Every structure is written in C-alpha cells, then in structure tokens.
C-alpha cells in the first residue's frame, strides 16, 4: 500500500503529507489492524527491502488469520448446530433468539479446534518468528545505515 491509499475499503486514509506509518481500523475478516507504510522520497535499497518485507508479512498474516477465523466461525456454527440437533433443539428458540450452548460444551469445541489445528499453528508460529527475526535484523541494518548517513552529513556540513 503506497501513499495515502484507503485501507481495506474502510474509508481510512492517512493525509498525503504524512511522514509516518499509519495504522488502520481492524479488518473484519482477520481482526488485524492494517498498516499503510510511509515511503520516504529518498528511500534506500535497504529501507525499501525492509518496507517490502513488512508489507509482505502483513499480507501473509492477514491472509492466514482471515482464513483461520473463517474456518473457526464455520466449524463453530457446525458444532453448535450438531449439538443442538442432538438435543432435539433448533438454531433459534421460540422467541427467535439464537440458541447457545453452555461453557462446558463450547470448551469441547475449542479444545478440538486447537488440537486439530495444532500443526497449522506451529508452522505459522515458526514462519512468524523467522519473518520477525529477519525484519528485526533489517531494522538494525537500516538504523546503522541512517546513523552513518547522518554522521557523513554532519562531517560534511561542519567541516566546511
């Protein structure tokens, strides 16, 4: 996402003159808050590499959690439906209110869902840590590059 583009159709749009990253409202499907990354006019290759990795990671994270949350909601609805059906109940009671299960019954679903998705979460966490380590390493390199650039500028301007 570049410049002052709107975030995920939410209408959120940082001002064009901003010199900072902007965090938008939570996405409806992933519950993650998307970021519009500031692109400086004199962005170095290293700064660009860092920004692009952060953008790719954001997109990867967004996709994972949107799919995971959709799967969770669908499986939860199916679980509730099957348990209510087994009890001879419908999804809505006589007043039209959505029927629910008690905490113990829902605990069965949560436990099963986490067990079933253990490997997926394990791979996600491994990849998340790899990405974050790389991002952190690149941030250190960018900080060093900026410090050296500032020292060269200071030496050039004070030396004259």
Image (cartoon, rainbow, N blue to C red):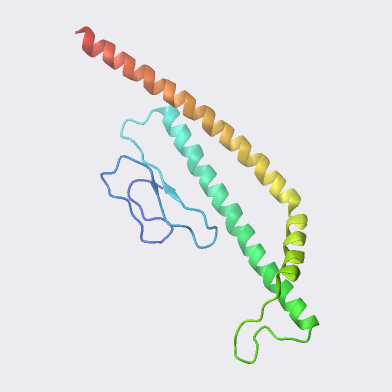
Quarter of the figure that contains the C terminus: top left
Above or below for 157 versus 146 = above
Q: Is residue 90 above or below residue 150?
A: below
Q: Residue furthest top?
A: 159
Q: In the picture, residue 97 is in which quadrant? A: bottom right
Q: How many marks?
A: 0
Q: Hey, which quadrant is residue 117 in on the image? A: bottom right
**Which residue ends up furthest to the front in the rendered image?**
103
Is residue 57 shown left or right of residue 80? left
Residue that protrudes farthest toward the bottom in the picture: 94
Q: From the viewer's perspective, is residue 119 above or below residue 20? A: below
**Which of 100 and 155 lies nearest the eye of the viewer?**
100
Instruction: Return the residue nearer the eye: 88 or 143.
Output: 88
**Left or right of residue 10: residue 125:** right
Q: Position of residue 11 (x, y in %)?
A: 36, 61
Q: In the image, residue 1 lies at what x, y percent?
A: 41, 48
Q: Which quarter of the figure has residue 93? A: bottom right
Front-most of residues 9 and 89: 89
The foreground one among 127 and 95 is 95
Give me the residue at 71% from left, 73% from top.
102
Where 110 falls versus 97 (above or below)? above
Left or right: where 39 falls relative to 91: left
Report the residue at 67% width, 77% height from top. Answer: 100
* Residue appearing at x 62%, y 37% in the figure: 129
- Image point (67%, 83%), residue name: 91
Q: Looking at the picture, how far across and down is residue 55, in whole percent?
A: 48, 43
């Amino acid at each position: 996402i570049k410049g002052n583009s709107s975030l995920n159709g939410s209408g959120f749009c940082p001002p064009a003159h901003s010199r900072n990253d902007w965090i938008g409202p939570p996405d409806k499907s992933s519950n993650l808050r998307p970021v519009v990354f500031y692109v400086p006019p004199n962005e170095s290759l290293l700064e660009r590499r860092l920004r692009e990795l952060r953008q790719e990671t954001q997109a990867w994270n967004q996709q994972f959690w949107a799919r995971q949350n959709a799967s969770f909601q669908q499986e939860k609805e199916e679980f509730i439906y099957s348990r209510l059906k087994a009890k001879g109940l419908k999804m809505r009671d006589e007043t039209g209110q959505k029927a629910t299960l008690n905490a113990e019954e829902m605990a069965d679903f949560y436990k099963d869902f986490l067990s079933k998705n253990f490997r997926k979460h394990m791979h996600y966490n491994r990849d998340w840590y790899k990405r974050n380590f790389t991002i952190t390493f690149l941030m250190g390199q960018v900080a060093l590059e900026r410090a050296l650039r500032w020292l060269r500028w200071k030496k050039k301007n004070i030396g004259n």
